[in-house]
Amino acid sequence: MADDEVMEAQLWRKNGWIAKVIKNPDDDGWAVEMTRIGDDEPALVGPWTMGRDKKNPKPLDQPAFLTLVKTATEVLRRHEQSARARLHRSIAFVANAASPDGAALRIRADLDLVPDDDDPHAILALFEDATNEPIRSGRVSTSFKLDAANVMHWLRSGA
């Protein structure tokens, strides 16, 4: 067993996670907290089963710990996906006569919000959709409306 591993009835510390059985503050039962080592707050808090005496919590065991790790990892993954979806938008459109030879060009525009308390802004990046070659990128307002007309206006204006 590694030096930092703990496998007790109400506390497991293993594989980068801490599972801790706690008194449920909302009722007379028990809850379990799953915290990734290094994080300030638990990724998951859920009800925990009572033991046979109907007073004390059921002890943590290997199968329960592995299930809790899997569930907490999935919760974190969904939170990360949700955060990415809030901060990143992308559209693709055909811009007629946008290429140097006057041909239609398929453009992908990526808008990434930068949530800075002092200086919130966004980065707009344009790419040739077929080749992924960068066309232009720059800073825009967080209120920039991502649609083909606004992107083309921004591209032509050089702003």
Image (cartoon, rainbow, N blue to C red):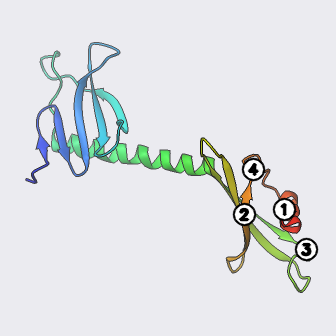
Residue occupied by mark 2: 138
Q: Which mark is residue 96?
A: 3
Determine the residue positioned at 15% across, 39% down: 61
Could you tell me the amino acid type at mark 2?
A: Gly
- SS for tag 2? strand
Choose the circle earlier in sequence order: 1 or 4: 4
CB atoms at circles 1 and 2 under 8 Å apart? yes
Q: Residues within 10 Å of mark 2 (few under 14, many from 20)?
A: some
Instruction: Report, in whole angstroms, how far the alpha carbon at label 3 lies from the one at label 1.
Output: 15 Å
Instruction: Report, in whole angstroms, how far the alpha carbon at label 1 lies from the one at label 4.
Output: 12 Å
Residue occupied by mark 1: 154
* 3 vs 52, nearest the viewer: 3
Choose the circle earlier in sequence order: 3 or 4: 3
Residue 81 versus residue 126 in the image, above or below: above
* 125 vs 25, nearest the viewer: 125
Q: Residues within 10 Å of mark 1 (few under 14, many from 20)?
A: some
Question: Residue 11: percent from the left, percent from the top?
Answer: 17, 35
CB atoms at circles 1 and 4 under 8 Å apart? no
Residue occupied by mark 4: 141
Q: Is residue 141 left or right of residue 113?
A: right
- SS for tag 3? loop
Q: Residues within 10 Å of mark 3 (few under 14, many from 20)?
A: few
Closer to viewer: mark 3 or mark 1: 1
Task: Locate the C terminus by quadrant.
Answer: bottom right
Could you tell me the amino acid type at mark 4?
A: Ser
Determine the residue positioned at 24% across, 41% down: 18
Choose the circle earlier in sequence order: 3 or 1: 3
Q: Residues within 10 Å of mark 4 (few under 14, many from 20)?
A: few
Could you tell me the amino acid type at mark 3?
A: Asn
Could you tell me the amino acid type at mark 1?
A: Trp
Instruction: Report, in whole angstroms, how far the alpha carbon at label 3 lies from the one at label 4.
Output: 26 Å
Instruction: Report, in whole angstroms, how far the alpha carbon at label 1 lies from the one at label 2.
Output: 10 Å
